[in-house]
Image (cartoon, rainbow, N blue to C red):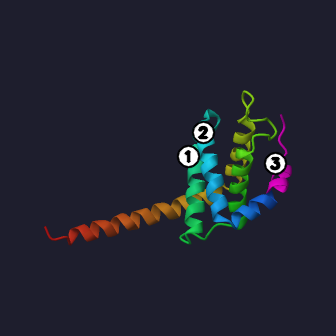
Amino acid sequence: MKLDFSKIFRKLSPKANRIYHDKNRLNSLIKEGMKLLFSNKAFADLIDDIKIALQLIKSYYKGEYRAVSKKNIIMIIIGFIYLVNPMDVVPDFLLGGFIDDAAVFAYIIKLIHNELASFTLWKSKLDLNESTIEADEEDYEID
């Protein structure tokens, strides 16, 4: 099985662009995709990176984190579109049918690795600052 990633991206980009502009469709896609991800061992090695990618999308849409390119958000969406499509290169109902889906996600994670690393660093600094603020507020609490 040889996957043509550029063909997959070209084919799914228009749909991903439409979903990018529709939060309801994006939420539905992610919800459906996450059910498949958690129920399939083919994604075990990727699940942490996919969770980070989802946190990035969530922070992006909330306006908290904007240092990500639209192209990379679209690529994550493409990964989910490919995942929920049961009739991709290897139909999902066949034994090992999620191997191609995992390969597509692994390729996307590899392409956006720097973006995920930047987001993770930003998030860790934010979490550190928030915990510092909480600790300061607790210090002034009257018992």
- Left or right: 20 with respect to 37? right
Residue sitting nearer the eye, 98 or 69: 98
| Label ID, residue 128 | none
Relative placement, left or right, of 96 versus 118 is right
In magenta, the rendered stretch is: 1-12
Q: Amino acid at mark 2?
A: Asp
- Residue 82 in view in this figure: yes
Q: Residue furthest top?
A: 95
Q: Residues within 10 Å of mark 1 (few under 14, many from 20)?
A: few
Give the image location of residue 16, x and y in percent: 75, 59
Residue 45 is labelled as 2
Residue 16 sits inside the magenta stretch: no
The answer to which image quadrant residue 65 occupies is: bottom right
Mark 1 touches mark 3? (CB < 8 Å): no
Judge the density around disc 2: few (<14), some (14-19), many (≥20) Cα neighbours within 10 Å.
Answer: few
Label 1 sits on a secondary structure element that is: helix
Q: Where, by quadrant of the figure, is residue 89 drawn?
A: top right
Q: Which residue is mark 1?
A: 48
- What element does badge 3 sit on? helix
**Residue under the point 59% across and 43% down:** 35
Marks 2 and 1, how far apart in space?
A: 7 Å
- Nearest to the observer: residue 63 or residue 22: 22
Amino acid at pointer 3: Phe
* Percent position of residue 116, x then y: 60, 57
Please state the horizontal and vertical placement of residue 133, each as a whole percent of the image: 33, 70
For disc 3, the marked residue is 5
Instruction: Tell me if I can see residue 118 in this picture.
Output: no
Q: Position of residue 76 (x, y in %)?
A: 68, 55
Q: Decide if residue 36 is on the left or right side of residue 125.
A: right
Q: Amino acid at mark 1?
A: Asp
Residue 15 vertical placement versus 61 (above, below): above
Which mark sits nearer the N-terminus, 2 or 3? 3
